[in-house]
Amino acid sequence: MGALEFDNVVFGYGGSRLFDGFSALFPTGSISCIVGPNGCGKSTLAKLAMGLVKPTSGRVRIAGRDVSSLAARERARLLGVLVQQQEAPMMTVRELVVCGRFPCCGSFSRLSREDEERIDEALLLAGVSELRDRSLQSLSGGQRQRVRMAMVLAQDTPIVLFDEPTSFMDVAACFDMVRLIRQVRQRGKTVIAVIHDLNLALSVADQVFVMERGRLAAQGEPTDGCVRAAIEQSFGVRLEHVQTGCGTAWVPFEPRE
Amino acid sequence: MLLVLLLALAGVVFAGLALGSSSIGASDVVAYATGNASDMAVNVLANVRVPRVLGGVLAGAALAEAGALIQATLNNPLASSNIIGVNAGSGLFVLLFACVAPHALGVSAAGAFLGALASALLVFFVSLYAGASRLTIVLAGMALTSIFTAGMNAILIFNPDAYVNSSGFLVGSLSGVTASELVIPGCAICVGLLVAAGQGTRLNILSLGDEGAHALGLNVQRTRLILLSLAALLAGAAVSFAGLIGFVGLVVPHIVRFFAGHDNRRVLLLSPVVGAIVVCVCDTVARTLFAPFEIPVGICMALIGGPFFIYLILRSRKGEVDGRS
């Protein structure tokens, strides 16, 4: 049983089919990165996983349980999702992170000591403890993203799904985010991330899922030849694994004529 | 802050009872409270001023809370029950029901709630299916208001006796409110305020956007529907006895957010108190400024709220309202 499973999923927007019998199994306890060119269905996978859209046929399972059979809060206690960057609500950092406890404590109950501990841990882990009383409007894009990450961590779910966690971030903030994703995995959580930056995705992933026009073109470790070939095929680039004294990086190049 | 506001409300209520066109003053109010008032003071206070001030408190609290709910639910700081057509829809149904069953008990309150609910549902479906922007919802609400107002005017042309003091009803007035008129809407408002006070966390989650709220386990559309219905209950109950008082629900939540921040738990707790204060003050001013003549409280509110609405639109055009475009 995987953490997240798509079983023969058929789905499309309007008349056109995006997925036609899509299947994939995201393993428990690892970091899985979904990569693929724009429009291949990466973010739609996230929407299917969180039950925001429903498959025409097939099953989506979280921890072995059909998403469609889960109550909304039950789902939110199994799967935490960092949705794509939206406008910042008028809140302080702590108020936003407190929202992460909603699936556990609901609308009316006060925060328990355990809730407070989870919130403090999430603030600390995301490195935003010192910003707790700042308004979200006063933060940079990178800081806001870390705060939103803290909210998802406060949810304390066994599986977390990050949809484009590094969009609008500068290089240093991107590497910060990669470190944070690794820390989350070290805490025993399953991490699934949709990342458009190939180097970041291949650097952080235990398993890479390469998407191409609604199908899974390849799945494997970043160094697997089939993964590399699928990336080169779907993006239309040449991918080099560059090793220097500073470390390693995956660099896409223009294809040879 | 809540305690300070409650004390301020107590002061405003006392002033509302003590001031007026007759000679009944503060000492008479104290005597009335202790059971030693003259017959004339008892008559004026029990039959005129107490129902009127109580009506102002209830209407202000209900309309302000409805505005806070609507603004947060639609994520639209320009919205309120009179802007999106809920008050006008409520008024239309009050007049329709008054034509059909003029003497039936609670008919006014029932009509007001049904009209408010129908209008709120219309706005809900516009926002749901048209994916409408903030200004589009406001414009759609204005169109609805025009249609409902035309309906009300048509009823009053064909049946001028459909409603006593219809001109006061159309602009919003607390003149002639009786204690018996307040019983049913008063109960509805108290229940509505109690339920609304517990919705702050849900509204905070809604402010994260549809996807963010869904990810946290909130059923977004069902929550919107419930909260708009709650706002309709509050606005409809207020309209049933106070008529179409405008702008309370627009102005008050902004005042509260300015002083107490944007946490909806606080906004929903403080808005009814501030709303009650604003309406009571405006009504007291409206009936004492030109005594023995009085102007309806709705005119006083429009003089404050109209310019404030234009100011909000100008800020919205610059993307400054609530710091968001």
Image (cartoon, rainbow, N blue to C red):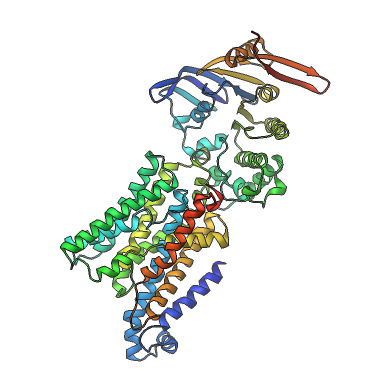
Depth check, front residue: A51 or B288:
B288
Where is residue A154 shown, x and y percent of the image? 62, 42
Report whether B317 appears left or right of B93: right
- Residue B303: quadrant of the picture: bottom left
Depth check, front residue: B136 or A107:
B136
Residue at 31% from the left image edge and 67% from the top image edge: B241
Give the residue at the far right of this rendering: A245
In the image, residue A21 above or below residue B87: above
In the image, residue B136 above or below residue B192: above
Residue at 67% from the left image edge and 42% from the top image edge: A143
Quarter of the image containing the N terminus of chain A?
top right
Where is residue A42 shown, x and y percent of the image? 54, 25
In the image, residue A140 above or below residue B154: above
Report whether B79 appears left or right of A167: left
- Residue A31: quadrant of the picture: top right
Where is residue A241 shown, x and y percent of the image? 73, 15
- Residue A206: quadrant of the picture: top right
Q: Is residue B114 visible?
A: no
Where is residue B128 shown, x and y percent of the image? 39, 41
